[in-house]
Amino acid sequence: MPGVTNDGPLDDAMPLSDLMPWSVAPLRLGRSWPLAPDSASLKARWNAFVRAPEEGREALLEPSRTRTVHTAAAQLPGQRTGTEPLAHAEGACPEPVRVLHGPFDEQWLIPDQRLIDAARPELWRVADEHQLFVVEQGHVPGAGGPALLACAVLPEGRSPAGRPGRIRPLYRRPGGAEPNVAPGLLTHLSGTYEQEVRPEDLLAWVLATAVRDAKECRVPLPLERDVWVRGVELGRRALWLHRRGEGTDRPKLPGGRRPYVRAPLPARPVELLYDREEEALLVGDGRISPVPAAAWDFHVSGVRVLEQWFARRTAPAQPGTLAAVRPATWPQPWTSELLELVTVLALLAELEPLQRDLRDDLGDLITPGELRRARVLPVPVGSRRPASVLDHPEEGPGGQFAFL
């Protein structure tokens, strides 16, 4: 299985919780229908919900202990939604936002806290164009795959298998202010390597070297500057791929290879297979190639990424539920996303031997004792809590404003 192996912590490797102290639990949606691979389906689901009489809305909502049609909830930070109980909701659907639903699977979410059991507002307060998130993946004994994923969009944080980890923003405040890094760590590393170490450098190193055991993610910190530089460069490449490039600079396979649709995908594909000999992805009667075997074999927490991505778009929904409101045929944008995902996974797989070599060449490490002597450890309790954000009022339940 491609991916960084999770063989257990290295000697003197630091817990990620001591390097990036503030973390948040994964979101808990409570129902699947406010999330979808396309935004049009979400708007259609919302319209069906608000057109239903009050007595029919309860079943459509799929109520939980914390959310019913009579539950009022505050607006999520940065979002404009109603705050009255859903029994009285009307009007257009709140504009869906892009989120990371699972490994390398960006989808759309209705950003309405009345629909989400635990939306983690503290994450929404710091989610902006300057933010990056690290998402710990569930530990599955003997399984390969990266210990961490990174993204610029808000992550849901659920792991495909194993107990989910935590979400760690790179910054504690909007606008890229106040790094979520142990106080004094960047200064100590800058002195050790005789060059400036920025928050983004630490994030890149973490992506390149983190391993996960049954308890936590751990990160080795090298003493040698050359090892650090090598790891940061490798991590920057990984981060760029996790984000699927930036702007018009999109990932491409080397040597001019590029996955193409060789046979049209059916309107309603129900099966995804792989032909290793032909390096072809079989989407029903459709055919995509070349698809490197490394892309097909790429796993996270023991789950094949391409299979899970496909299943989340084709698995049948229970008739009569809002989740059953979906595209009647396979949308063309999904094909483009699939082609790009194949490329990203293949390129990430190419980094794996480089990551293994890096871990073999770490040399002596910065020890917890050294960081205690430098007064970086123990991490202050306040660094593990969200920062106070007092910049703007947020509308609470029933239209009342709350200041945070």
Image (cartoon, helix red, strand yellow):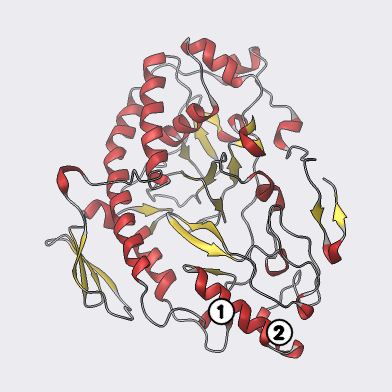
Residue in the picture at 46% in, 52% down: 140
Q: Which residue was labeled with disc 1?
A: 44
Q: Circle 1 sits in a helix, a strand or a loop, which is it?
A: helix
Q: In this view, does 46 lie to the left or right of 8?
A: right
The disc at residue 161 is none
Residue in the picture at 49% in, 62% down: 107
Q: Nearer the viewer, residue 237 or 192?
A: 237
**Relative to 119, is 403 above or below?**
above
**Relative to 285, is 240 above or below?**
above
**Relative to 147, is 334 above or below?**
below
Q: Is residue 142 left or right of residue 33?
A: left
Q: What residue type is labelled 2?
A: Arg
Q: Which amino acid does label 1 sit on?
A: Ala
Taking the image as drawn, is residue 362 in sight?
no
Residue 215: x and y in percent read 56, 43
Q: Residue 21 occupies which quadrant of the picture?
A: top right
**Relative to 385, is 302 above or below?**
below
Q: Nearer the viewer, mark 1 or mark 2?
A: 1
Residue 296: x and y in percent read 27, 58
- Which of the two discs, 1 and 2, labels the residue nearer the N terminus? 1
Q: Is residue 256 left or right of residue 33?
A: left
Q: Which residue was labeled with disc 2?
A: 57
Taking the image as drawn, is residue 377 in sight?
yes
Residue in the picture at 71% in, 57% down: 76
Q: Circle 2 sits in a helix, a strand or a loop, which is it?
A: helix
CA–CA distance between discs 1 and 2? 15 Å
Residue 400: x and y in percent read 87, 60
Q: Residue 89 occupies which quadrant of the picture?
A: bottom right
Mark 1: give few (<14), some (14-19) or many (20+) Cα within 10 Å. Answer: some
Mark 2: give few (<14), some (14-19) or many (20+) Cα within 10 Å. Answer: many
Q: Residue 302 occupies which quadrant of the picture?
A: bottom left
